Amino acid sequence: MPRLSAQGATLRLFDPKTGQWSLNWASSISGTLFPPVFGRFENGRGEFHGDDSYDGTEVRVRFVWSGISATSARWEQAFRVDGADGWVTNWIMDFTRPSGTTAG
């Protein structure tokens, strides 16, 4: 069976009243809009939390954006099950912008 890669889109919304962002992932594979994570950026780091499920188990989700610069950033996803100590990081992505390109 061919392996399916994670494909989709993230809708990022800023609430000026709370100063928080919501990150909303939509999967093109399952056609599902997943529960949002909420948080903010402070001192060059973004941390976002929400509730979801993984393989039928309720989990707390944490996304962390760090190392943010004009040419790079790091994103990490971690889960924590109720009653468990600490976070289990299960996905890390390092982003780099090709030289000669600009944001926009």
Image (cartoon, grey):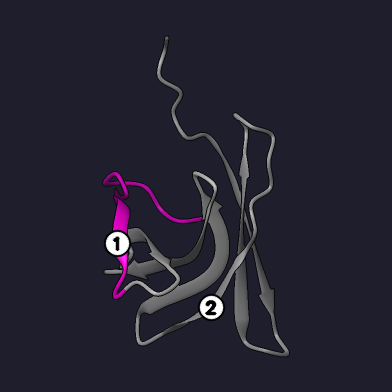
Q: Position of residue 96 (x, y in %)?
A: 28, 50
Asked if the stretch drawn in magenta spans residue 20, the answer is no
Residue shown at the point (52%, 34%) measured from the top left: 7
In the image, what residue type sits under mark 1? Val
Element class at badge 2:
strand
User: Quick one: label 1, few (<14), some, or many (20+) residues within 10 Å?
Assistant: some
In the image, what residue type sits under mark 2? Gly
Tell me if 98 is positioned left or right of 3 in this view: left
Asked if the stretch drawn in magenta spans residue 93, the answer is yes
Q: Position of residue 29 (x, y in %)?
A: 59, 29
Q: Position of residue 69 (x, y in %)?
A: 31, 68
Residue shown at the point (42%, 12%) measured from the top left: 2
Count of residue discs = 2
Judge whether 77 appears above or below 65 on screen: above
Tell me if 104 is positioned left or right of 98 in this view: right
Residue 13 visible? The answer is yes
Which span of residues is magenta-colored? 85-104
Q: Which residue is mark 1?
A: 88
Residue furthest out toward the front = 83
Residue shown at the point (43%, 76%) measured from the top left: 47
Asked if the residue under mark 2 is in contact with the one under mark 1, i.e. CB atoms within 8 Å, the reply is no
**Image quadrant assignment for residue 86:** bottom left
Q: Quadrant of the N terminus?
A: top left
